[in-house]
């Protein structure tokens, strides 16, 4: 079985839904489709959840109306038959009235997640019904019945696989299954999410769960580009990445992939293909265990980074000092991304600042603390990058952009720079021209 994930833009209109239906019919074998909500819908649901929490009835009505018309337009375009439309409008009304009733309940994190994940339910019901009206045999699966993911860092894919298999076997087999991305059931048995952009992660969790032959992630761009195309001109798709390279790029901000997308498939060696829904014949990017080409592949950037410096001329080099510092972060379950040390100071970065106050409180015992907010990690990735003769050009960036920290040599395939976010765009653009001859030639 292949797992095919289509993102918000790919299913964002009746025309695009038809296009996706054509694409899947040209792919051989059994398929399990993981679909996002229509583009813009999850953002509306985030707004709705805020208004429900505030019990702001006029705004609740306004957003529900916007959600209705967003889907109404596409239902009208997708279903010519009056009965089919009625069936879909009844489904839509039922889903929206469930959302309306959330306002009568005590607001909890489960209420929030139930609201946020409603877009996927509506869209998968529309999509599955559309396939049926086109006489394409398929089954709709409720992801809440099998996406039991307690630990976001290390999903138990065996368990998901068993529950999913039970769902598949409880009905007649079909060549196509359709299910929702983004939603999960947490360790308390409550509806929760895989965080924004999480449908990519759903696809690879399911891929590992059912030992899929491959996972295809269909989006609105022709694969993973060598740099962020929203910020930098003259970017180009990278044809092939190793799992490790793709995992680094996703973790360090390449928006095309949810940060954790790659981890579930590495152990099972399941390739992931990134493809463009609007140019299906473009090759896109293949992510697998193979890394044929060594050297620099791509650059990404992760925002909302906080740098913490601990300065202590007495204790830093003392035996056991670093362990004590790490224990503070461990106690508050806060991951450290970058770290550099000098004779008298240690600098490190975190992105989760939920427990920043108590962490700083405890660190004060070890020295003078300073904190820099609103920084970005720029991550330069490629296997064997350190040995690439062009890599030293990276350091020419120091002429133009103030760099707060550099991490070099932690692994052979990653060099990270920490800059104030206000310099991020300049740094990405600059590095693109300095490091990629192709980008440089296109720019002159
Ligand atoms: P989907 O809704 O299909 O999940 P996303 O918007 O989450 O799509 O991801 C695709 C977008 O990611 C692209 O349109 C592009 O603007 C952005 N993006 C950021 N960095 C990269 C990159 N390195 N390569 C490709 N796309 C990127
Ligand atoms: N619809 C969800 C979001 O917008 C999940 C996803 O698209 O991957 O975050
Ligand atoms: Mg996405």
Image (cartoon, grey):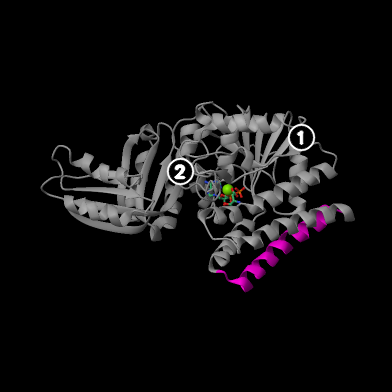
Q: Residue at x 74, y 40 (%)?
A: 23
Earlier sequence position, callout 2 versus callout 1: 1
Could you tell whether 427 is left or right of 68 in the image?
Answer: left
Identified at 77% across, 60% down, the residue is: 73
The quarter of the image holding the N terminus is top right
180 over 385 or under it: above or below: below
Image quadrant where residue 189 sits = top right
- Which secondary structure class fits the magenta region best? helix
Residue at (42%, 49%) from the top-left corner? Answer: 431
Q: Quadrant of residue 53?
A: bottom right
Q: State the image coordinates of residue 321 (x, y, percent, origin top left).
A: 18, 41
Judge left or right: residue 400 versus residue 141.
Answer: left
Residue annotated with mark 2: 251
Specify start and end residues of the magenta stretch as a single range.
Answer: 55-80
Q: Residue furthest left?
A: 314
Observer able to see residue 37: no
| Residue 244 position within the rendered picture, expressed as x and y whole percent measured from the top left | 46, 33
Q: Answer whether residue 78 is magenta in the image.
A: yes
Disc on res. 26: 1
Q: Secondary structure at mark 1?
A: loop
Nearest the camera: 345 or 321?
321
């Amino acid at each position: 079985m292949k797992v095919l994930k289509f993102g918000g833009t790919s299913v964002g209109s009746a025309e695009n839904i038809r296009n996706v239906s054509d694409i899947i019919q040209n792919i051989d074998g059994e398929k399990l489709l993981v679909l996002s909500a229509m583009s813009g819908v999850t953002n509306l649901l985030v707004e709705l959840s805020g208004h429900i929490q505030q019990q702001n009835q006029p705004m609740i009505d306004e957003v529900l109306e916007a959600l209705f018309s967003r889907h109404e337009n596409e239902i009208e375009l997708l279903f010519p038959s009056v009965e089919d439309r009625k069936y879909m409008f009844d489904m839509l009304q039922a889903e929206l009235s469930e959302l309306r009733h959330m306002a009568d309940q005590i607001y909890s994190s489960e209420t929030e997640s139930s609201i946020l994940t409603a877009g996927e339910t509506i869209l998968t019901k529309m999509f599955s019904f559309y396939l049926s009206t086109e006489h394409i045999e398929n089954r709709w699966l409720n992801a809440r019945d099998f996406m039991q993911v307690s630990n976001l860092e290390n999903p138990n894919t065996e368990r998901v696989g068993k529950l999913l298999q039970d769902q598949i076997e409880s009905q007649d087999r079909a060549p196509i299954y359709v299910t929702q991305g983004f939603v999960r059931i947490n360790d308390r048995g409550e509806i929760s999410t895989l965080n924004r952009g999480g449908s990519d992660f759903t696809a690879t969790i399911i891929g590992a769960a059912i030992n899929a032959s491959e996972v295809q992630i269909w989006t609105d761009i022709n694969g993973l580009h060598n740099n962020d195309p929203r910020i930098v001109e003259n970017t180009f798709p990278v044809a092939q990445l190793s799992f490790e390279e793709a995992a680094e790029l996703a973790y360090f901000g390449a928006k095309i992939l949810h940060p954790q997308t790659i981890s579930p498939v590495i152990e099972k060696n399941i390739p992931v293909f990134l493809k463009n829904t609007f140019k299906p014949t473009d090759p896109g990017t293949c992510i697998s265990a193979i890394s044929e080409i060594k050297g620099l592949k791509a650059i990404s950037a992760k925002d909302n980074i906080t740098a913490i410096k601990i300065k202590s001329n007495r204790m830093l080099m003392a035996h056991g000092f670093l362990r004590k510092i790490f224990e503070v972060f461990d106690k508050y379950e806060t991951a450290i991304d970058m770290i550099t040390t000098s004779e008298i100071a240690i600098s490190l970065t975190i992105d989760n600042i939920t427990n920043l106050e108590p962490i700083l409180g405890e660190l004060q015992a070890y020295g003078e603390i300073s904190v820099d907010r609103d920084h970005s990690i720029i991550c330069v990735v490629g296997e064997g990058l350190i040995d690439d003769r062009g890599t030293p050009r990276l350091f020419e960036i120091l002429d133009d952009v103030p760099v707060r920290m550099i991490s070099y040599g932690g692994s052979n395939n990653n060099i990270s720079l920490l800059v104030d976010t206000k310099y991020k765009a300049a740094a990405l653009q600059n590095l693109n021209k300095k490091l990629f001859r192709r980008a440089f030639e296109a720019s002159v």
